[in-house]
Amino acid sequence: MTPKKRIFLALALLLLAAMACEYLPTPAPEASQPPEDVIATSVAATIIAGGGEAPTAEVPTTEPSPDPDSDGGEPAGIPTPDHPPFLRIVYVKDGNVWYWEEGSASIQLTTLGDVISVYLSDDGLVAAFIRQYDWNSEEIYAVNTDGTNVRPLVTLAHFSGMKIFTEAISAVPYRIAWVPNSHTLAFNTRMTFEGPGLILGNGLRHVDADTGALSVIVAPMAGGDFYYSPNGSSIALVNSTTISQVDSTGGNHEVLLTFPVVLTYSEYNYYPPVTWYGADSYMLASIPPHAPLDEPPDDTTIWYIASNGATPIVLITLTPVPFFHDPVHISPDLSKIAYLSMVTPGAPPIVDLHIANPDGSGDVLYDSGDRRFEAWSTDGEHFIFTEAGHYPKVGRVGDPAQDLLGITLMLDVSWVDETRFMYINRLSGSWELWLRELGSPGVLLASTTGDRIHFDFVK
């Protein structure tokens, strides 16, 4: 590359770093360096190491209000979010969908039975759900959260036409998510066979929950797992060797990062998750080494991936426990990471729980033992960890961990906001769905001696 081109690339990447800073969150008081400076500094250091010059970039202290008519507004065709101002929850109990909102009692939305999972639209008005009749037979339905208009969206006949291997028995839904700020449901498929294994269709389809219209966004075997940017204008596609991007219509496909296949030592391929930040500006991804069980193991890499196609940046390499024991956890606001490092292998293994900035700075050894990280709060301030699901604790860097009493086995932890979280408590012979606030005993929303409860929420 000529010197002129290197300088141009350096300036372009630094501009990206400066733009990214505008969308990063307010730093936590205990952080050794503000998160926006951490990522921008790491990107700039990488450019300098490559022979470029890094001019000083001013980080805005306030975010200007977007002008819908300007280039900085919401993309055309994507409505302004209309989120409910209060918490709304849907859950599956005894094979049917239930709905709860703050200030009201739970109501039952369906009586069909066979429901195994449920997904709530951004505006809280529509719940999509999967009915499973057997391992090879599933359908997608929807119901309005006022209890009206239970309707099939993707039927057995539809899924029968989605098989891409002659040896497959059927196709069934795999990953389901609402397209941001819409009543359009996005989903991909997995193939079912006589034997074990997980084979994805690696496509992406939409179904309109209001009209029932079904469309192909990414053709089978051309995509992978999918992650929508917060404003819905971009879609990250992940498979076993690449992270790529398409626009909201499935066009303008661009490979952003390639990496070696990660051995799972089982009958499935590993697709690393990505975490978006900003409207659609960049994402972070944690990529494990090719052979996680090698001794000594190679490093896991945290990547900064810009959506504009700029060269991805390595923020840090580290050596955590294998991803199938516990992956690296990136906080929702991208301000921190949590990871476990091995101390003593065994059953159970003894590990150290680390909390750090995304570039590895400010690394704190927070706790040690038979630990498993569960979930970050939405602002990256608090986190929950357990002893393999038992004895849950709430942590915060700089503060001692606090026990969460009254929980037998904590599962499916999901933070609602900075101080509230939901979880399943597994008792002997029953499942409980709880909503809890830091410092309070919590509210029991549902319990059953039947199948495991599944839930979703918007706020």
Image: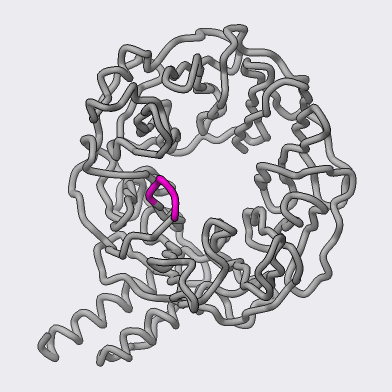
165 displayed left or right of 181: left
User: Relative to residue 432, is residue 260 drawn left or right?
Assistant: left
Compared to residue 111, the image places residue 81 above or below, namely below
Pick whichever, 26 or 414, lies toward us.
414
In this picture, residue 40 sits left or right of residue 424? left
Q: Residue at x 25, y 76 (%)?
A: 12
Quadrant, the N terminus: bottom left
Foreground pick, 420 / 271: 271
In the picture shown, does residue 18 fall above or below 426?
Answer: below
* Figure disc tally: 0
User: Which residue shows up at 62% across the image and 18% down it?
Assistant: 97
Which colour assignment does the render follow? one colour
Q: Magenta residues, as a range?
A: 265-269
Residue at the (71%, 41%) spot, across then down: 422
Q: Position of residue 87 (x, y in %)?
A: 67, 34
Query: Quick one: 196 or 61, which is closer to the camera?
Result: 196
Q: Main secondary structure of the magenta part?
A: loop
Whole-percent x, y for residue 384 in the image: 72, 56
Please check the rendered image and state whether residue 379 is part of the magenta-colored stretch, yes or no: no
Q: Quadrant of residue 4?
A: bottom left
Would residue 416 be seen by someone viewing this image from the given angle? no
Residue shown at the point (37%, 13%) measured from the top left: 155
- In the rendered image, the quadrant that contains the C terminus is top right
Examine the rendering and report whether any part of residue 241 can be seen. Answer: yes
Q: Is 431 above or below relative to 56?
A: above
User: Which residue is situated farthest in the left direction here?
Assistant: 2
Q: Picture coordinates of residue 441 (x, y %)?
A: 89, 43
